Image (tube, rainbow, N blue to C red):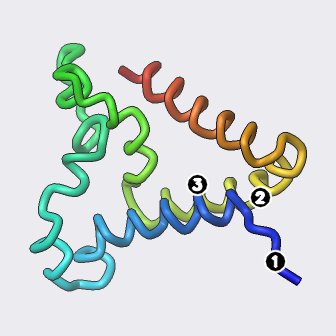
Amino acid sequence: MQAKRSLTNSLIAVITGAFLLGNGLNVFGTQYIAAIFPRFTEDFALLYGGQFSNGYFPGVSTGEYWRLITVALTHAGILHLASNMFCLWSFGPTLENYFGKARFAILFFGSLIAASAASV
Protein backbone atom coordinates (compact mmCIF):
# COMPACT_ATOMS: atom_id res chain seq x y z
CA MET A 1 0.00 0.00 0.00
CA GLN A 2 1.42 3.37 -1.03
CA ALA A 3 1.40 6.15 1.54
CA LYS A 4 -0.68 9.22 0.71
CA ARG A 5 1.60 12.08 -0.28
CA SER A 6 0.97 15.30 1.59
CA LEU A 7 1.41 18.72 0.04
CA THR A 8 1.68 20.13 3.56
CA ASN A 9 4.67 17.93 4.38
CA SER A 10 6.27 18.81 1.04
CA LEU A 11 5.85 22.53 1.72
CA ILE A 12 7.34 22.13 5.20
CA ALA A 13 10.31 20.21 3.78
CA VAL A 14 11.00 22.74 1.01
CA ILE A 15 10.65 25.80 3.26
CA THR A 16 12.76 24.26 6.03
CA GLY A 17 15.35 23.08 3.53
CA ALA A 18 15.59 26.57 2.02
CA PHE A 19 16.02 28.05 5.49
CA LEU A 20 18.80 25.62 6.33
CA LEU A 21 20.43 26.25 2.97
CA GLY A 22 20.27 30.01 3.29
CA ASN A 23 21.18 30.20 6.96
CA GLY A 24 23.26 27.08 7.38
CA LEU A 25 26.36 29.04 8.20
CA ASN A 26 24.56 30.59 11.19
CA VAL A 27 22.84 27.39 12.30
CA PHE A 28 25.74 24.99 11.87
CA GLY A 29 28.72 27.35 12.08
CA THR A 30 30.07 26.36 8.67
CA GLN A 31 31.19 28.59 5.81
CA TYR A 32 30.41 26.11 3.01
CA ILE A 33 26.87 27.27 2.31
CA ALA A 34 27.87 30.94 2.35
CA ALA A 35 30.61 30.19 -0.16
CA ILE A 36 28.22 28.41 -2.54
CA PHE A 37 25.18 30.69 -2.11
CA PRO A 38 26.51 34.03 -0.80
CA ARG A 39 23.40 36.06 -1.67
CA PHE A 40 20.63 33.54 -0.93
CA THR A 41 18.62 35.76 1.43
CA GLU A 42 19.25 38.92 -0.58
CA ASP A 43 18.10 37.27 -3.80
CA PHE A 44 14.88 35.77 -2.42
CA ALA A 45 13.61 38.19 0.24
CA LEU A 46 11.19 41.00 -0.47
CA LEU A 47 13.32 43.35 1.60
CA TYR A 48 16.73 42.42 2.89
CA GLY A 49 16.56 42.67 6.67
CA GLY A 50 12.95 43.83 6.55
CA GLN A 51 13.99 47.39 5.77
CA PHE A 52 11.53 49.87 4.30
CA SER A 53 12.94 52.64 2.14
CA ASN A 54 10.50 55.35 0.97
CA GLY A 55 8.26 52.92 -0.93
CA TYR A 56 11.14 51.45 -2.93
CA PHE A 57 11.51 47.72 -2.61
CA PRO A 58 14.76 46.36 -4.05
CA GLY A 59 13.95 43.62 -6.49
CA VAL A 60 10.19 43.86 -6.88
CA SER A 61 10.38 47.51 -7.94
CA THR A 62 12.84 46.55 -10.66
CA GLY A 63 10.77 43.68 -12.08
CA GLU A 64 11.98 40.76 -9.95
CA TYR A 65 8.44 39.55 -9.24
CA TRP A 66 9.49 36.05 -8.18
CA ARG A 67 10.32 37.64 -4.81
CA LEU A 68 6.58 37.78 -4.10
CA ILE A 69 6.69 33.97 -3.79
CA THR A 70 10.27 33.20 -2.75
CA VAL A 71 9.90 35.43 0.30
CA ALA A 72 8.20 32.40 1.90
CA LEU A 73 11.59 30.68 1.84
CA THR A 74 13.21 33.32 4.05
CA HIS A 75 12.74 33.57 7.81
CA ALA A 76 14.21 35.90 10.44
CA GLY A 77 15.43 33.04 12.60
CA ILE A 78 14.85 29.50 13.80
CA LEU A 79 11.98 30.55 16.10
CA HIS A 80 10.23 32.33 13.22
CA LEU A 81 10.63 29.26 11.02
CA ALA A 82 9.52 26.88 13.79
CA SER A 83 6.36 28.86 14.58
CA ASN A 84 5.39 29.14 10.90
CA MET A 85 6.02 25.45 10.24
CA PHE A 86 4.10 24.48 13.38
CA CYS A 87 1.08 26.46 12.14
CA LEU A 88 1.38 24.91 8.68
CA TRP A 89 1.72 21.43 10.22
CA SER A 90 -1.29 22.09 12.52
CA PHE A 91 -3.72 23.51 9.97
CA GLY A 92 -2.33 22.33 6.63
CA PRO A 93 -3.55 18.71 6.67
CA THR A 94 -7.09 19.74 7.62
CA LEU A 95 -7.25 22.36 4.88
CA GLU A 96 -5.62 19.99 2.39
CA ASN A 97 -8.19 17.27 3.13
CA TYR A 98 -11.08 19.73 2.97
CA PHE A 99 -10.09 21.56 -0.23
CA GLY A 100 -7.97 18.91 -1.94
CA LYS A 101 -4.34 19.32 -2.95
CA ALA A 102 -4.91 21.57 -5.95
CA ARG A 103 -7.21 24.02 -4.19
CA PHE A 104 -5.02 23.98 -1.09
CA ALA A 105 -2.01 24.86 -3.28
CA ILE A 106 -4.00 27.71 -4.86
CA LEU A 107 -5.04 28.91 -1.39
CA PHE A 108 -1.47 28.70 -0.06
CA PHE A 109 0.22 30.46 -2.99
CA GLY A 110 -2.65 32.91 -3.48
CA SER A 111 -2.41 33.96 0.17
CA LEU A 112 1.35 34.20 -0.14
CA ILE A 113 1.18 36.46 -3.20
CA ALA A 114 -1.60 38.60 -1.70
CA ALA A 115 0.31 39.10 1.56
CA SER A 116 3.51 39.91 -0.31
CA ALA A 117 1.74 42.34 -2.62
CA ALA A 118 0.06 44.04 0.35
CA SER A 119 3.44 44.57 2.01
CA VAL A 120 4.83 46.16 -1.16
In 3D space, how far apart are the residues under numbered discs 3 and 1 (Cα atoms)? Answer: 25 Å
Residue under pointer 3: 84
Q: Say which of marks 1 and 2 sits in front.
A: 1
Looking at numbered disc 2 in the image, what kind of residue is underneath it?
Ser
Determine crowd level at label 2: few under 14, some 14-19, many 20+ residues with C-alpha closer than 10 A: few
Identify the residue at image location x=55%, y=68%: 13
Closer to the chain start, of discs 1 and 2, is: 1
Residue 9 position within the rendered picture, expressed as x and y whole percent measured from the top left: 66, 65
Q: Secondary structure at mark 3?
A: helix
Q: Which mark is residue 11?
A: none
Indicate left or right for 47 with 96 as reference: left
Residue 49 position within the rendered picture, expressed as x and y whole percent measured from the top left: 25, 44
- Circles 2 and 3, Cβ within 8 Å, touching? The answer is no
Q: Secondary structure at mark 1?
A: loop
Looking at numbered disc 1 in the image, what kind of residue is underneath it?
Ala
Q: Which mark is residue 3?
A: 1
Determine crowd level at label 3: few under 14, some 14-19, many 20+ residues with C-alpha closer than 10 A: some
Residue farthest top in this picture: 55
Residue under pointer 2: 90
The residue nearer to you, when weighing 56 against 79, is 56
Indicate left or right for 101 with 75 as reference: right
Residue 107 position within the rendered picture, expressed as x and y whole percent measured from the top left: 68, 34
Looking at numbered disc 3 in the image, what kind of residue is underneath it?
Asn
Residue 78 position within the rendered picture, expressed as x and y whole percent measured from the top left: 44, 66
In 3D space, how far apart are the residues under numbered discs 2 and 3 (Cα atoms)? Answer: 10 Å
Determine crowd level at label 1: few under 14, some 14-19, many 20+ residues with C-alpha closer than 10 A: few
The residue nearer to you, when weighing 71 against 106, is 106
